Amino acid sequence: MAAAHINLTCKPEGRQFSPPSLLFLHNARRQTSRHQTITTTITTTPPTTFSMAQHAKRPLAFSSEGLYWAQADLGGHFMAFHTARLPITHVQCDCRKGDFAKEASYDINLDLFEPLLFPLPCPSTKRPASGAGNIPIFTLIVPRTAGYITRSDFFQIRLQDFAHPHIVATLECTQALTLYRNRLIPGHGRERVILTAPFIIRWDDFNNVSTSAMQEHFASISTQLRRRLNNVPWLGQWPIPRKRVALVRGRPNITAGGPIYRAAEALGIDLVIVDDAGHWLELSTKDNLKHREAFLATDMTEDEGVVDRIIASIRAYPLPIHGVFTLSDNFFVTVAKVAQELGLPTNPVSAFETAVDKYRSRLLQDSPGQTARVTSVQELEALLEAPQNGDQPCFSPSFPMIVKPTKGWSSECVSKVSKLEDLATAVEKATRRHGSAAVIEPFFDGPEIDANFILIDGEVAFCEIADEPPCSADDPNATVDDTFSPVALTLPSALPEEEQRKACDVLSNILIKLGFRTGIVHVEARMTNSSWEYRDVGDGIIDLAPKDGPPSLDNIFTGPRLLEINARPPGYRVTLPSKCTYGVDYFAAHILAALGDTERLRMVATPFGEVVEGIGHGAQYHSRLVYVPAPAAGIVRWKSPELSPCEDLMRRRPDLAAHISINTDYFQPGDKITTFTDGARTYVAHLLVRSVNSRREAIEIGNEVLKSFEICIEDHEEYVTSEEEIPDEMAEVIDEVIEDAREKMMGLEVIDEKEGLCR
């Protein structure tokens, strides 16, 4: 078999390659026969040799800047081109067959590659490139076909938390809605591919001077890329018109609103804000104009005229508005009426009216007499004394029971009542909040789940189930003073597949029968009579595990019990973890549903493939959302003026930082906080931790994060951890502190999910 021998002379060690350059030779293509083998020998300084024999039909290229080139089929929609930049200055060829010259030096057209001579932006949380002695590694991802770009941050989402190797930097050269023209045409130079590649990755430098090791390294990268990219199209077949959507209630600040604004921008959708005058987005500052196209000042007083006022503002805007949506629970029905009047995409008003009323939504599964609605303690007393009315049974409470406002959020003023004499206290607490009535319903024992659905034309496009571990009110000895404030959330669920399918089917059927056809819906439910339960699984770890013994006839899982329906993405704290874990962006889905853009909605509803064997459900890892409760009431002080508590934790514990995907502090130095706000725990931060190894490891890391988190509360002599007991005397703070804390938190992304997201 004929072979070509190529000797490559490398530059001396110590040459600095910072910032890295991508330099390719436009005329380095070689014509070889089908059966020819190329044998490559590379000599480095100091002397190190390695060789490779490769069939000519497999892509191979070197340039005078020492670029090794290999391509990989990612399946489905993409190709990957891997490059290793070797410090080579001279190429000498000795070829016994083929078109190679015996000696050749290849010059680089620097003007041609000037767009790629850049220092790639390096995220601060990633490790920098290793050093001059190693080999810079790049991957270029190129679509197989031409098409219209559905969203500009597609690759950032699909490649987030890439496990190994580490991504040092990326460059995403895309703009939503524009036409990407495929350049993978035989005969075109590689520089054409490089200059039109929509996404370029620089990995950690490769430190193994072996071509076979480099090939294995590229093969591993290709496998991971394939699992993330091959199941979802990035390009649309037809032109995507630019559209405009109105957001009613513009979010209280950039932290809460940023993910929505960024999603709209990435989708190429113009955002118009409808809100009260004086909102922070009203001023047309340079920063505000990055987030919205226009602000329509409108009186948002929640009265009978609010629908007409919003409609008038939208109709008065000189440019067409193609959709309207909100993230505010109080405005779901209002916005549905606005959309209906304007002829814009929406689900039925009646579906929203039932979803926002926890009493009406409970009746979707309850039998008569199980659930009651009262507006006062006096009405409760009258209800308990009322005789049976014909065939309609009177309300007969069966303890324990749950009492909560018919309209509410964040588990505020939700009580578990175990005896009749506590029922009035719970009703009084619930009716004080938001001025709404109280719903009294049965307490269903069993694992609690969050189920998030993306519906398209009445079918489930994506369903995610996450596990909520027991909170203080789940304790059998819980009193009316214990709360249902969450302590954590674990993704994906550990419940048996059969039970998860049953939950998805039962809950989605309720939503569809209610009238929901297209959009994102967040549902909370209890898995009564589940075959699994929470218990100590060893070393103090509380998690789901199979129950002991076979199930009895009266203890067989029959399906989930609905707790509440929220016709929106889950709260801010939960939406971003789902995006990290599954690659599914609920905010983007919410916007696209409001426009009726089902083609792109289907795209954003597609999770990862099987990134890690054994996890399933489209999750790339096991994740644990950790809520850090306020350890005491008082005034916040940071341990270091330059570092927030989350940043301080990651600085002190790099072993934990390596597993943290999201960290968010809620308070600044000087902020006043309370331990409880309207009956719900006050949180000072949340963090998302991950593990590709096991669910247990994710929980253990989460527990260690909670244990190691430190925040300073004034009047405490030492820094206290979040697991310390809260002194009783600190729980009773004066009214001024309560009000100041609430006002401050309304300006941050902390406790108030009144508008569908944590504030």
Image (spheres, grey):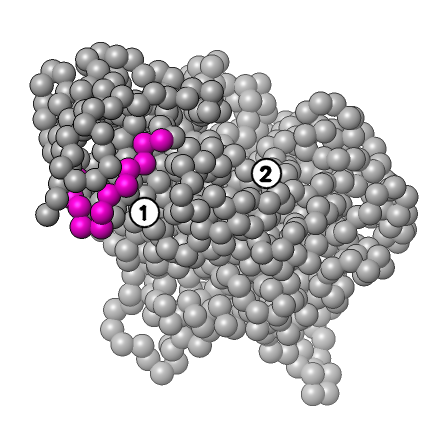
Magenta segment main secondary structure: loop
Question: Quarter of the image holding residue 294?
Answer: top right
Percent x, y of residue 137:
30, 30
Q: Residue 559: which disc?
A: none
Judging from the image, what secondary structure is the residue with disc 1 in? strand
Q: Which residue is drawn at 36% across and 51% down?
A: 74
Chain part drawn in magenta: 27-39
Write the residue at 49% across / 51% down: 145
Crowd rating for badge 2 (residues with CA inside 10 Å; few <14, some 14–19, many 20+): some
Between the C-alphas of marks 2 and 1, the distance is 25 Å
Residue 468 falls left or right of residue 705: right
Identify the mark at residue 175; answer none if there is no mark: 2
User: In the rendered structure, which disc, 2 or 1, sits on the residue that comes first in sequence?
Assistant: 1
For label 1, the residue is 72
Q: Which of 258 and 330 is in front in this view?
A: 258
Q: Can residue 50 be seen in this view?
A: yes
What's the residue at 63%, 31% (across, down)?
254
Closer to the camera, 570 or 199?
199
Residue type, numbered disc 1: Ala
Q: Is residue 654 above or below residue 314?
A: above
